[in-house]
Image (cartoon, grey):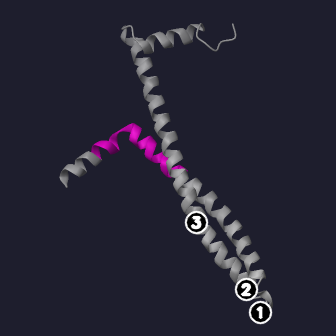
Amino acid sequence: FRKVLQIFRQQSEDRKVQVTVLSAFGGAAVGSTGGGALGLIAGGSFGAACGLLPAMLTFGISIPLGAAVGGTCGLITGAAAGGTAGLVSGGLVGHGYAHRLLARSVSEASKFSGHCSIANWAWTRRSRGDGTGGTH
């Protein structure tokens, strides 16, 4: 158990892991909020429409009950689906961003080290403006 805690402490101090986890949780929060709201609207509308059929027999009480049941089911399902999608996509974006920051710091470190490397060569070409994608 101590070995697991030691690994957890080491990983929690890593900047890339922090960026990835924070992005994943942010994506989950945004995704579950949007998914839950969309599910509530869609489920409530569908539930009210389904409540129209037995409305003659229940004197209209089935319409709001159908909307409540449909809205609740839609809210739960939408929040779960949106949260999962947001967690995965936010984590992927955060992981890519963390590695881009790492690549940038390696590139700048190699610029000052004096060694010839691929990162230094790419940075030099980009700073002189003779790389691909230029307008000249």
* Residue toward you, 12 or 37: 37
Percent of width and height locating residue 115: 36, 8
**What's the CA distance linking mark 3 and mark 2?**
22 Å
Percent of width and height locating residue 86: 55, 51
- Please say if the residues under marks 1 and 3 sit with CB atoms less than 8 Å apart: no
* Residue toward you, 10 or 83: 83
Q: Main secondary structure of the magenta part?
A: helix
Residue type at mark 2: give it. Ser
Pointer 1 residue: 57
Farthest-out residue, left: 2
Percent of width and height locating residue 107: 44, 18
4 on left or right of 36: left
Percent of width and height locating residue 96: 49, 35
- Please say if the residues under marks 1 and 2 sit with CB atoms less than 8 Å apart: yes
**Could you classify mark 1 by the number of other residues whose Cα lies within 10 Å: few (under 14), some (14-19), or many (20 or more)?**
few
Q: What residue sits 68% from the left and 70% below the top? A: 43
Residue range corresponding to the magenta coloring: 9-27
Pointer 3 residue: 77
Q: What residue sits 59% from the left and 7% below the top? A: 130
Determine whether 98 is above or below 12 in the image.
Answer: above
Closer to the camera: disc 1 or disc 2? 1
Query: Would residue 14 be counted in the magenta stretch?
Result: yes
Pointer 2 residue: 62
Residue type at mark 3: give it. Thr
**What's the CA distance linking mark 1 and mark 2?**
9 Å
Which is more N-terminal, label 2 or label 3? Answer: 2
Q: What residue sits 58% from the left and 54% below the top? A: 31
Q: Quadrant of residue 34?
A: bottom right
